[in-house]
Amino acid sequence: MTIQTTIIPSRIDASAVDGEYIDVTDEDKITSGKRYFSQLANQEIEIIELQANATLSPLDAGTLLADTFIDADGYTDTVDTGSSTATFDTNKYKSQAIGDTINGAALPTNDGTNTNAKGLRILTTAAINLTSVTKNANVTATKCHLRANDDSPIQSATFVGNVATFNAALDDATYYKLMIDSDGGSYTGYRATGLSVYPIVGTSLNITDGVSVSVPDATTAYNIASLITSSNLESYEVVIDLPTITGTVIGTLLVANTPDREDGDAVQYSITDGVTTDADLVLDEKNDGLAYTLDSAPTQLILNLLPKETSPTEGVPSVKSYCLVLLKS
C-alpha cells in the first residue's frame, strides 16, 4: 500500500483500554495504567533490596526513586531521621504503640481521714496521652487531678468506681503530678512509706515520687494503684529527602514493601515541593490529573504508617522498602 492510500486515523480509539495496564488521559492520550507502574515499581524494590544485600548494580530508571531501609538513614542515605517519627528496627521502619499500664507501689497502710490532695509524681519518657488513673480500692476520694510540676492545674477527672478517665496530652521529658482528693471534702487515703522502689519504669513514663500536698518524696506513695497511657500519634512518619528532579512531574505512584500489617491499619504517603503538599495518598494508585497539585518538582516524600485505632499491635504497620514512580509530561 502506497502512502497515498494509507489510512491514518486522526484520533486513536481508546474505548477499549483496561485502566490497569493501558489507560487514557483526559486529553485522550494513551498512557500506561496503574498496574504497569506497580509492577515496574515492585521490580525496582526487588532490585534495591538485592543491591543493598548483595551489592548488585541496579538498572538505570530515570523516573524511579527507590530505597530499602538497611539502616536508619536508608541505603541511599535519604531518610531525614530528625523529622521522622516512625521507629527504625533492624531493616524496616515501624509504628510504635508506646502506651502501657504502669502499676504503682503497694499501699498497705491506712492514711486516715484527709482533705489535702496526695498522689504520685511522674516523668515522661515520650510524648503520650494520659488515658486513665486507677485508685487503690480502699481509697474513698472522688477526684483525680493532673497538674504540672509547679502545681498549676491541667485537667481533672471524677472517679467512676476506682477509675478516673483522662484524655490529656503529655510532653516528653516532663514532670507531672497526679493528685487525688475529694475537692476539699474528707476522704480515706492509703499510703506506703520507707520505699526504695523508685523510679518505677514504664514504656512511656516513670513513677518517680510520692507527693503529699505538693512536696515530692521518693520514699512514699499515696492513693494511686495504676495508670494507663496511650500513643498520641495517629500516624508515624518516615521523612525522605528526594534528589534534585529534572523535567516536569505531573503525577506520582508509590509502591512499598510493608511486611507487618493487620486489619484496620493503613499505609499512605504524602509528596511535597516545600510549598504545596498532596497528602493521604493511597499506595499503588496514580496521583495525577487534577489531584496532583504541586507547582514544582517534589522535594520530599513522607511515608505515613497509621496503626489501627483500637488496640494496635506494637510495630504494625511497617515499611521495609519503597519505589516512587514520577510521572512526567
Image (cartoon, grey):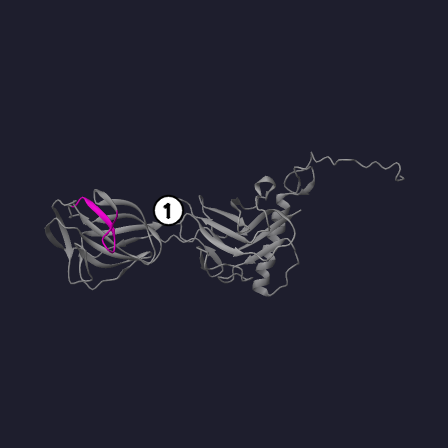
Q: Which residue sits at x=37%, y=46%?
A: 311
> In the drawing, does residue 279 fall left or right of residue 117?
right
Residue 320 visible in the shown view? no
Q: Residue 8's spot in the image, x, y percent?
A: 81, 37
Kind of residue indicated by mark 1? Ser
Instruction: Check the picture and name the quadrant holding the N terminus.
Output: top right
At 56% across and 54% down in the image, what residue appears? Answer: 299
Instruction: Return the residue found at the far bottom.
Output: 55
Secondary structure of residue under mark 1: loop
Magenta stretch: includes residue 70: no
Please tell me which residue lies in front, 136 or 167.
Answer: 167
| Residue in front for this viewpoint, 279 or 12 | 279
State the residue at coordinates (54%, 53%).
300
**Residue 143 is a magenta residue:** yes
The total number of labels drawn is 1
Instruction: Give residue 293's position: percent from left, percent from top.
Output: 57, 43
Taking the image as shown, residue 259 lies to the left or right of residue 140, namely right
Q: Is residue 321 visible?
A: yes
Callout 1 environment at 10 Å: few (<14), some (14 to 19), or many (20+)? few
Residue 315 placement, left or right of 284: left
Residue 98, located in which quarter of the rendered image? Answer: bottom left
Where residue 161 appears, as percent x and y from the top left, is 21, 42
Q: Is residue 291 above or below residue 98?
A: above
Magenta region: which residues?
141-154
Q: Which residue is mark 1?
A: 311
- Determine whether 17 is above or below 324 in the image: above
Measured as percent of width and height from the top left, residue 27 is found at: 68, 37
